[in-house]
Image (cartoon, rainbow, N blue to C red):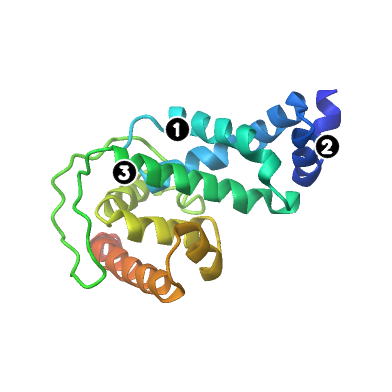
Amino acid sequence: MATAYSQKSDRDLVLACQKREPQAFEELVKRHQRTVFALLYQLAPDWDDTSDLAQEVFIRVWRSINNLRNPASFRSWLTQIVTNLFYDELRKRPRKLPTVSMDESLDDEDDGATRDIPDTSLIPEEKALNKEISDVIRQAMLRLPEQFRTAIVLREVEGLSYDEIAVITQTEMGTVKSRIARARTKLQEMLKPYLENQEVS
């Protein structure tokens, strides 16, 4: 039975889940749990309960899957659930970084200690420097305001369009483009000393 489900498309699994077939849901979880974990980690690299949050994502998926009218759009729907959970958690948790408005300059100070968790998914093509550059990027991402980090993760990691990001984050298209552009600029500024040092060495 499990083999039959493993051969189904996401769309067919969603349709089976809407008929409340638990084995179909188990296959969806197995197929997408790493993606959910990685997205949560990149949205909130300093949180230590990513596994619990990933479980909560799939609880929400099971509860709400009957509301998914287009089963073929499961992946983008799942991304929206992850992002909504991230925003829900932001509202509940004390913030280590201040909220920065679009009109203010970014603050370079970073008072919070970063967690030393290796993440090999950020730049897999850089095998030799993978852990080192992952740490550098994680620390740089931590210094971005949450709304900037969310926008650039959805664009660069999830590969979503500006339209999709605007819908998920409930912001205007111009705001999405501005946040992504400013996040890229800020990341380049923070990574420049590291990259220049690599060229020298």
Circle 1 residues within 10 Å: few <14, some 14–19, many ≥20: many
Residue 63: image x %, image y %?
A: 61, 33
Q: Is residue 39 left or right of residue 26?
A: left
Q: Amino acid at mark 3?
A: Arg
Q: Which mark is residue 91?
A: 3
Q: Does dot 1 land on a helix, a strand or a loop?
A: helix
Q: To which residue does mark 1 refer?
A: 53
Alpha carbon separation for disc pair 1 and 3: 15 Å
Q: Which mark is residue 41?
A: none
Q: Is residue 173 left or right of residue 64?
A: left
Residue 175: image x %, image y %?
A: 38, 72
Q: Give me the residue at 31% from left, 67% from top.
A: 188
Q: Quadrant for residue 194, please give it.
A: bottom left
Residue 124: image x %, image y %?
A: 50, 50
Q: Is residue 48 above or below residue 97?
A: above
Closest to the observer, 163 or 49: 163
Q: Which image quarter holds the N terminus?
A: top right
Q: To which residue does mark 2 refer?
A: 7
Q: Closer to the camera: disc 1 or disc 3?
A: 3
Q: Earlier in the sequence, mark 1 or mark 3?
A: 1
Closest to the observer, 147 or 128: 147
Alpha carbon separation for disc pair 2 and 3: 39 Å
Closest to the observer, 30 or 164: 164
Q: Give me the residue at 41% from left, 76% from top.
A: 174
- The answer to whether the residues at label 2 and label 3 have Cβ atoms under 8 Å apart is no
Q: Amino acid at mark 2?
A: Gln
Q: Does dot 3 land on a helix, a strand or a loop?
A: helix
